[in-house]
């Protein structure tokens, strides 16, 4: 059982189309933060804010590799089954963009 505050925080994160699309892309595996900048028509600071919200909600884990940060879904999150169920029902129109820099995922 989750508190209303915990669930509210996760639902707020999941209530944004950009964040849902980012999570959907991470469903296939780890993604470099720079790949999201290449995919979406928004600034790098905005991408960072989205990633921070998802990380603070416990939905993401990060791995640092020099100056690059790679993100993946947190499979140990108590909300992981809910997130996966939701993502399995999401269609996105953003292709898997990949990273155009030398981040070497």
Image: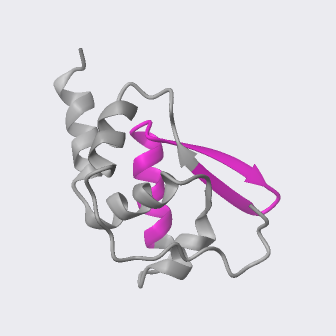
Tell me which corner region of the image, top left, top right, bottom left or bottom right, holds residue 15.
bottom left
Which part of the image, by quadrant, shows the C terminus?
bottom right
Q: Residue furthest left?
A: 4
Q: Which residues are magenta?
A: 46-71
Q: Residue at x 79, y 66 (%)?
A: 104
Q: Residue at x 44, y 29 (%)?
A: 77
- Above or below, 104 against 55 in this view is below
- Above or below, 89 against 47 in this view is above
- Above or below, 65 against 84 in this view is below
Q: Residue at x 29, y 65 (%)?
A: 91
Which part of the image, by quadrant, shows the N terminus?
top left
Camera-side residue of 34 and 46: 34
The answer to whether 62 appears left or right of 89 in the picture is right
Question: Residue 23 magenta-drawn?
Answer: no
The image position of residue 54, as x and y in percent, is: 42, 48
Tell me which corner region of the image, top left, top right, bottom left or bottom right, holds residue 49.
bottom left
The image position of residue 17, as x and y in percent, is: 27, 65
Q: Residue furthest right?
A: 66
The image position of residue 79, as x and y in percent, is: 35, 31
Camera-side residue of 86 and 20: 86
């Amino acid at each position: 059982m989750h508190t209303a505050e915990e669930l509210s925080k996760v639902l707020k994160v999941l209530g944004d189309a950009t964040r849902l699309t980012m999570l959907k892309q991470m469903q296939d595996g780890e993604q470099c933060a720079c790949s999201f900048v290449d995919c979406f028509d928004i600034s790098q600071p905005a991408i960072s804010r989205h990633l921070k919200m998802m990380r603070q909600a416990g939905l993401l884990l990060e791995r640092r590799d020099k100056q690059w940060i790679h993100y993946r879904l947190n499979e140990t999150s108590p909300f992981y089954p809910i997130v996966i169920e939701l993502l399995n029902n999401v269609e996105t129109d953003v292709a898997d963009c990949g990273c155009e820099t030398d981040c070497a995922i």
